[in-house]
Image: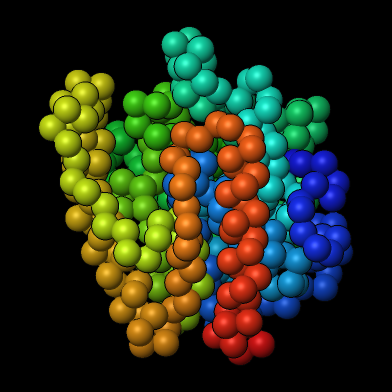
Amino acid sequence: MPHGPEGAVPTGDPCPAPADSIATMTTIDDTAIVFEGGGMRNAYTAAVVSELIAEGINFPHVSGVSAGASHLCNFVSRDAARSHSTFVDLVDDPEFGGVGHFRRGQGYFNAEYIYERICYPDGAMPFDLGAFLRNPARTNVAAFNASRGEVRWFTKDEISTLDTLGPVIRASSTLPILMPPTIIEGDTYVDGALGPNGGLPFDAPLRDGYRKLLVVLTRPRDYVKPPLTPSVSALLRMAYRRFPSVHQGVALRASRYNAGRRCLFGLEERGRAYVFCPDNLWITNTESHRERLEATYRAGLVQIRREMPAIKAFLGM
């Protein structure tokens, strides 16, 4: 949830400041927005967040999981500059992560730093909590409670301070093995993608009564997630032997994820969803080269600008 320099987003028009955006935004009352995770692949869909903010579009219900939870924070706080800096500029910070941090037990992504420390007023990239709270949108962030073997949805009321927000976004984004688990209220949490829909958090808005969804995915339309390999399965069993639900969640994720995508595309066919899928995404979830991330963001910007008229038509604008 880092805060980038003012005007850092490479768009054709200046992006509104968070306070100005909240004052002038249009909320689409009958539609919820859903953000998929995907680690650094979310550099592509960070452009979607920036462009929706630039267009003054808001939603009453916002759901996110894993890296999509950072999108949720940036979107609800209406900070387009942060959307860019979270997935592009931050990799230049020496504390961002890497093999050295992984060996020291901080994780390949230095989660405690990038989700908590930098967000405070004296941190490297302060987070505008006031703007986040002033947006009336309802928020749902999914994280997997490994202690109880179930997904927990955190609402805005539960993440209304920096002391509570940071750990929840960190928990939702905690990639098994690559990052140490997050402890909240004595329970152990890992990536929210281990839930029933395999990391596609559209069940929250449907449960809350929304019949239309704008879904922002980080995989191409024809993507099919492969099953867990035996070697990774063995590694997970060993690493999480105290929490067998983590191995089970990862083992089931491919089938759940693929079924979730089929459900979303079915909703799309019935006119109840608009599904944004990247046309050309060439990086992995652990990409750390700024030039490649910048190119990824710009590719996303080209696509979302091309699709924006169709999205507005779906939203009735």
Residue 156 is left or right of residue 219, and the answer is right
The percent position of residue 11, horizontal first and vertical second, equals: 77, 59
The percent position of residue 210, horizontal first and vertical second, equals: 46, 78
The percent position of residue 93, horizontal first and vertical second, equals: 68, 25
* Quarter where residue 272 is shown: bottom left
Residue 198 is left or right of residue 36, and the answer is left
Residue 236 is left or right of residue 211, and the answer is left
**Residue at 55 percent of width and 85 percent of height:** 314
**Residue at 34 percent of width and 75 percent of height:** 265
Q: Is residue 66 above or below residue 32?
A: above
Foreground pick, 237 / 147: 237
Q: Residue 58: tell me if it is visible.
A: no
In this view, the residue farthest toward the top is 104
Q: Residue 115: tell me if it is visible.
A: yes
* Quarter where residue 138 is shown: bottom right
The percent position of residue 151, horizontal first and vertical second, equals: 34, 49
**Residue at 60 percent of width and 42 percent of height:** 293
- The colouring scheme, among rainbow, by chain, secondary structure or one colour, is rainbow
* Quarter of the image that includes the C terminus: bottom right
Q: Is residue 289 above or below residue 51?
A: above
* Quarter of the image that includes the N terminus: top right
Residue 93 is left or right of residue 232, and the answer is right
Q: How many marks?
A: 0
Foreground pick, 94 / 185: 94
**Residue at 80 percent of width and 27 percent of height:** 122
Foreground pick, 6 / 248: 6
